[in-house]
Structures are given as C-alpha cells and as structure tokens.
Image: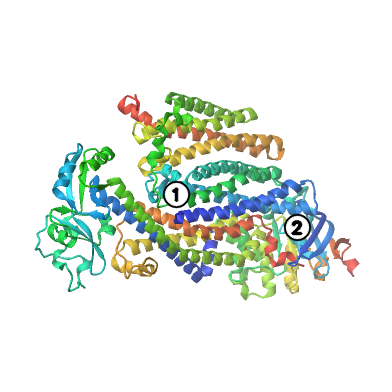
Amino acid sequence: MIAHPILMAIGMADLFGLGLILSAGWIAGDILLHWNSDGRDRRQIALEARSERGGAEARWGAGLFAFSTLLLVIAVTRILPELIPGAMCGTGVFQAMQGAGFRAFALRFITLLLLFLWHLLDRLNRTSRRGPLTETSARGLLIALPGAVLGIFDTFKAVSLLDLERPVDCCAALYDRFGNGNSLPFWENIPDAFWMGGFMVTGILLIAAGVWSFLRPGRKSAALLAIFSLIWPFAAAGALVQVLSAYHYQVLSHSCPWCLFLPEHWRVGFFLFGALLGGMAAGPAALLSIIVGQRYPAIREPARIMSRRASAWAVLLSILFIIGASFPALLWRLRHGVWIGG
Amino acid sequence: MSGGIFCRDLELVRRGSSGQERTIFTDVNADFPAGNITLITGPAGSGKSSLLYILAGLIRPTRGEVLDGEEAVSRWLTPHRDLWRKGVGIVFQHFQLFAELTAEKNVMIPLLPKKWPYRRIRNRANEALERLSAGHLSQMPVHFLSGGERQRVAVARALAADPAILLADEPTAHQDPEGMKIVMDVFAEARDRARVVVIAAHDPRIAGIADRYYRFIDGRLLHDRGPESQG
Amino acid sequence: MFYWALRDILRRPVRHLLMIFALAGLMIAAAAPLLFTGALSAGAEALLSDAPSIVIRRADPVGWQPIPIEPGIKAAESIVGVIRVRARRWGVIDGPKNPLVVIGDKGLSDNHASSLPDAFSSDLPSNSDFQSADFRDFSERFPLTPETAPLTHETVSLSWVRAGQLLNLPLGTATDLGIDVYYPQEVEAVCRELSDAFPWPVQMLTHQEILSLFKRRASMMGSAALFSLIPALIGMILMVMAVLQQQAANVRETGLLKALGWTARDILRLSFLRMLLVIVPAILLGAAGIAAVFYGPAPFRSLGAPLGLFFGWHGALSALPFDAQVAGSAFAAAGTFILLPYIGASLWSAVRASAAEPGAFIEGGGAG
C-alpha cells in the first residue's frame, strides 16, 4: 500500500460517491416497486420528493465517480510510475496491481458509460415538468450500480497491492508476450494492414452514420451510429496501439498504450483515449435519446435535440481522434518518404 | 400570467421528531382565481400558513395537488417548480428579512438572479419601497426598523418582481390604520392587475377588501360567505 | 451574485480568513513529503547522469572487499564493448555531527588547506582520526547541478591517499570499479561477460539499477513521511465538520432564497462563488507558502520550522532545488487532497437545496 495524497483523494471521492450512489440506488429500488405516476396518494407524493433527492444524489455521486476515475488515470499514468520501482508508465503500475488494476479500470469505464447514459435519461426526464422517465431512469441507475460498487472495490484492492519493495519490469511486461509465440494474445497476430483497414473502414462508416443521424435523427440512423461507435473504438485503439503508436514513439515497435500519457509524448493519450471514450458514449446516447423520445411525447423535442447533439459529438470526436492518432504517421511519411517498418 | 390556483384533495400531515403524526388539514378543495383577493381565516395552528406554503410551492402536500390553471404545479420537478416560483411573491408571517441588510438590499434579493444591470435592480427595489411608502427606509438596516416598517419592507420584497401570484400571511398584523391602508391598496392594485392574491389573516379589518372567503375549521377548509357570516 | 457572495464572506471575515490560512497550511504540510521525494528523485537523476554504466564491487561471503585496482582494470578492459574503467574510493565515515560520504579525489594533494563544508566548521573531536584540513567541499572540484543538492550536502572530497586511510583501504585497492560501455543497450550482455572475467566473485549494478534503487529509497522515505499527513487529515476532517456546521446554520438562508425565487442553480452558483472566494486565496497563499518555505531565501525558509516537528529537522530547512514539474505535481496532489473535501462540504448545502423543500428550512415549514 502506498500512501499518497492523490490516492487518498481518490479514496475519499470514491467513498463519498459510492455513498451517494448507494443511497440513490435504494430510492431507485423503491421507485421500481411503488411508482404510480397517475396516483395522488401519500406514498406516490412522498416518492416523487424522494425521487428528486435520489436523482440529485446520483448526479453528484456519478460526478465524484467520474472525477475519481480521472484522478486514477492521472495517478496511474503520471504519479505511480515515479513511485513503483521499475515502472516507467501505466504498464508497470498495472503489473504491480496484479490484475485487479485492469479489472478496476474496465469496470470503471463500463460504469462510466452506463452512468453517462443514466445521466442522459435523467436530463431528459428533467426537461419535462412531471418527469415521465423517472422509472426508466431508476432502472438505468440500478444497472450501473453494481459496476460502481465492484469498480471501487477493485480499485481499493489494486491500490492495496501496490508495493514499494517489489520492483516491476515495465518493458518485460510488454515484451514477454513475444517470448513464446503460442501464448500471444490473438490481437498480436493480426497483421497491421487489418488493423489499419478496420480502423479506416469502421471510422468512415461511423462518420457517415453520425452525419446521417445528425441530419435525419431517427431510429435507423441512430442505431447504425450506436453500432459503429461501439465497434470503432476497438479497431481504433488496436490500430493506435499496434501500428500508429510507433510513429508517436518514433521507434520500430512499442505496443504500449500507457506511454502515450507520458510528457515526452505530449500526454497525447489523454486526448486520444478521451476522444475514443467520448465517441464510444455518444453513439448509444444518440440512440437512447431517439428511443425514449419516441416513447414519451412530452420529451420528444428535447430528445431529438439531444440525439442530434450526440451524433455531432460522435462525428467530431472520431475526426479528432483520427487526426490526432495518424498525424505523426503522416508527418513521418512526408519527411522520410516511407512508413516505419517499410 | 396565472389563471388562478386550485387545490384538489389536499392533505398535510406533519411528522414529529418522535415519529408521531399530526394531520394539519385534509380534503382541502379550494379555488383562488386571478383578479380576486381571497381571504383565509381560522384559529391559530389551523393550517393557514401551511396552506400558503403549499400554494407557494415551498412544501409539498402529503396528498392531493395544487393546480396552476390545469398544471399540477405541486408535483412538478424541482427545476420547473423553481422557475414557476419566480412568479410567486410571498409575505411571511414573521417577515423573514435579512436583519443585517438594509431595506433596499432585502427588496433586491428576489431580483438578483435576474440578469439585470445592478442599477435596474436597485431602481426596481426602490420603486417597490416607494409604493409601500417606505422609500425613506431604503438605506436603513432592517434591525433598526419597527415591526410595522419591517412588515412593509417584506410586502415590498414580495411585490418587487411583479409576481403573478401574491401570497401574504398576516400582512397587516403590525400595521396602524395608515399602514393598513397602504398595504391594502397595494393588494387591491394587484387584484386589479389580474393577479392571484391570497391572504391568510386574523385581522378583521382585511375582511372588507376580500372577494372570496375560506375558513379553517377542524382541519377542513370551508367556503365562507364573508364578513356578514362572521358578524 | 458575486457581490452577494462577497458580502457573505465579509460578514464573517475572521472565520473565513482563518479558513484560508488553515487550507493553505494544510496544503503546505501535505505537499512537503512529495516535494522531498521529488527533489531526491530529481537529484538522483542529475547525479547519475554521468555515472558509469556498470559498477563492480568485490564480494565474498563476509561482505564487501576492497578491489585490487590493477588486476581489476585489466580484467574489465579485456571485455569487448568496455570503453573506460575507473577505480573509485568512497565510503561512509562517522562525521562530527552526522555520517559523511567521503570521496577520494586523485586530483587533490595530500597536504592542502581549503574551505570546509558546513558540517566541518566546528565540533571536530580532538581524538579524531581525520583532520579538518583533509576535506574539501565536494562541489569545489566536481561541478554539480543544483538538483543534486539534496543528495550531496553531506558529501566531501579528500585526497586519494587520505580517503584510502580513512576508509581502511589497503594500498593499490579501491572501493569499486566504474565501467563505461560503448552501447548502453549492451549493458546486460557486458555484465554477463564481466562476471566471468574477474578472478574473484563480484557483484554488479547497472546505471539503471542504481537509479531505481535511489528512486525506490526516495519513494520509501516519501511514503514514510506521508504518515505526517495524519495530523493534516485530522485537521481536514475538523475543517470539513466546521464547514458543514456553518452550512447547517445557513440552511434557513438557503430556504429563504429559494422561497424568494432563486432556483437551485442560482443557489449552487452562489455557493460556488462563495467557495471560490475562499479557495482561490487559499491556493495562492499555499503556493506562496510552498515557494517561501521550500525554495525561498533563508528567512522565509525558517517559516517551515514547525514542519520539522513532523519531518525531524531542526531550524530552517535547506532550500530545495526548484523543479517545475515536481513542484507543480506536488502542489496539485496536495491541493486535490486538501481542497476536495472542502469543496464537497461547501457545495453540500446547494446539493441539498437542489432537491429539498425550501419551506422545511423556514420557520418550521409554515407551522401555523
């Protein structure tokens, strides 16, 4: 266990955030069991008041959770590598966290995506005076809740595994994967051309679907956008880490996503992975807005506006990612006339 | 502009710290149309102030709803009720002024969230004070003022934002005949401008000005015929 | 709205001033261990920038042994890829006040007189087996960058022979050998060959391993020093409780503002402005305090004397070499740790107001 103010800040934000989300989750459970929007009885009126309190708690809890996740990314990429012997970037930190770190990150980002979609429902709900989405939004919160609990639990576990006495070998973690051809994960065997092809094709389709969904918001266009915005980040991240990272690092091959967060690489990782996650969230947001807008006439117009806005964000973020990720490669090609690796 | 506020099957139950429940009133059905002054009377503790709080959207009833026109405002989500409440002016029984602030600053408070220039806010506050003949008190901290003067500052504060609904709890309790006339003129003026005016009071002097009357008896709000029935 | 927030702050000036000082003080206390750790790490990096690629020491089952210079150099030079071999004499001796790192310098004559580092200016024991005149300030002959100061302030140089005498090194032996290699990437391979080339058992440390050791030690010291944060943590909890108590007292005002037409967003904005009026001066004061206590001239550094209670130094602190990245990240981490709970507590009343019934806050919610 390492005592560092930023880890303490993460712990505090997580604990407060979890407390608020759990309290809101309790109310959400009550809403699912007893909500009756047509009723004027005591229970319903009391539940309406509590639902608002629950919504406010969940909003602040989700905000704290997002903030602590950002702090965790900063800690893993900038602060902990300085403290853990042998760690040069997040790869070494993850090695020191022994698996719990990866689980914590995965759970946190899935939960953030779910909380973002919940937040969207909550915002749409609040555009209408009577909150027609209260039940749906309560359901959304309850779906995100287990991820928040497990993500925070795994974060605590991962941080408690950090040890200043036990050195790690950052590069070994990266290159040992190549030691034995049989144990390579399947993505290491995929040729670069496939990564780049997948990245470009899905990227173009995503942008096209986004433009379509922006111009003519509807179920079909938004569904297509949602599908591509969930597929594209994997192709894009693969292309970035397996192929394009070489141009950022200016070496033949170094498939490390975490080194992109280092100052010597302009901390471009924050921008690139931020754009990727934002784009990933925007597609489902566009679809969700359209679906609930069609189901609840009271929020149709704000839902349509929100769907268009989400489509625009999906297009903008994917274009920004493409530019940011491929710019060093294009620059290299212009300067040297060849690609790295021929 | 409000077409009037209407109570449907309102009930208010208060829960004490020991968990004990007390029904303040139940099955309240009442109409408060625009362009009328409605007077609510009843013994102390009968629920007059609580009803005003519910009409102002400051507390929720435990059952039933308050309608503004056809909209059940008492059940709106907070952000919408907050916006709706901007159209409500309320005079509290115990004034609820900021004691260390001047009268002018107190009257400015409802206007501060409006993105008006400071001068405009100040002018509007002073106009409201003038209407209550309290312009000369403008720069006095309210803790220096008498009960009657404070009450007039509180009325000026309720009027400053030109609300569509004006609710007043014992607004003349500390007024001498002259002050009483000033305050009543202001309410009459609001009625003439098609505002909803609801007054909860014991003061028999108010009865003459009201158009509609309600009386709380044993936790129920009954329609009343006015001064002749009380006489 | 801003003036309203300012008015609120000025209504209780002493309380808010104390809050600003408390926040700034806690930030300084929380940043201290991080600054020390950062300074030690940066110092190690600067100090080792010209260090040999490999350091070889002779070891037997008893422990370290002096390494014979001539056969050692010959054995090392026989390996392809080795470009330079240096014999080094250094070690730790008991100084008059503290243990000292002594370095043998071939460029110094045995009988020179020179200025002495602070550590030797007084209190030399009469029966000492070394003479004050032996010592030279390390920085006189070895130009060192300021970043190395946290690591070299108790390091002195003396003549090669005197160093050998003080460190009990027999004639013709050294403490270790420093080896430079042509390709730094080949260090691992050269190490394997070197271990077979010597007639005695040896232990080797590469440049990277030494740097890691330094950083690890710095991290461990920093981590231990972070226990000093416990008082800061208690202080922070007390402060948060005070803020929450103050918010509870202000709850009537919050309810009243809502009753008078303020929205939850307006109240949040007011709370935010009020909070900014406290934390911005606190951040500025904290930054100024850190600059003065850790990097400023001596009179300012003496302001940090109370921190010595936690970190175990006496009097004014030696100035730390300024590194913008170390200072910035320490300040940001300490600021986040200290300010986050304060911000949370300050905005809590606004969070409550956003969903609560304002009437509940005012005269019992219309009891009549």
- The residue singled out by tag 1 in the image is A75
In the image, taking residue B224 as reference, residue C129 lies left or right, namely: left
- The residue singled out by tag 2 in the image is B55
Classify B106 as above or below A134: below
- Residue at image coords 61%, 28%: A221
Residue B146, position as x, y percentages in the image: 67, 75
Same chain letter for marks 2 and 1:
no
Give whichever of C146, A36 is nearer the camera.
Answer: C146
Residue A324, position as x, y percentages in the image: 42, 35
Give whichever of C118, A280 is nearer the camera.
Answer: C118
Please say whether residue B113 is visible from this viewpoint: no
- Residue at image coords 59%, 69%: B102
* Quadrant in which the N terminus of chain C is drawn: bottom right
What is the three-letter code of the residue carrying label 1?
A: Ala
Please give the chain letter of the residue carrying mark 2.
B
In the image, taking residue C290 as reference, residue A42 lies left or right, namely: right
Contact, mark 2 vs mark 1 (Cβ under 8 Å): no
* Quadrant in which the C terminus of chain C is drawn: bottom right
Q: Quadrant of residue C162?
A: bottom left
Q: Quadrant of residue C313?
A: bottom left
Please say whether residue A237 is visible from this viewpoint: yes
Q: For numbered disc 2, what is the local secondary structure? A: helix
In the image, taking residue A177 as reference, residue C121 lies left or right, namely: left
What is the three-letter code of the residue carrying label 2?
A: Leu
> How many numbered marks appear?
2
Classify A283 as above or below B90: above
Residue A152, position as x, y percentages in the image: 55, 49
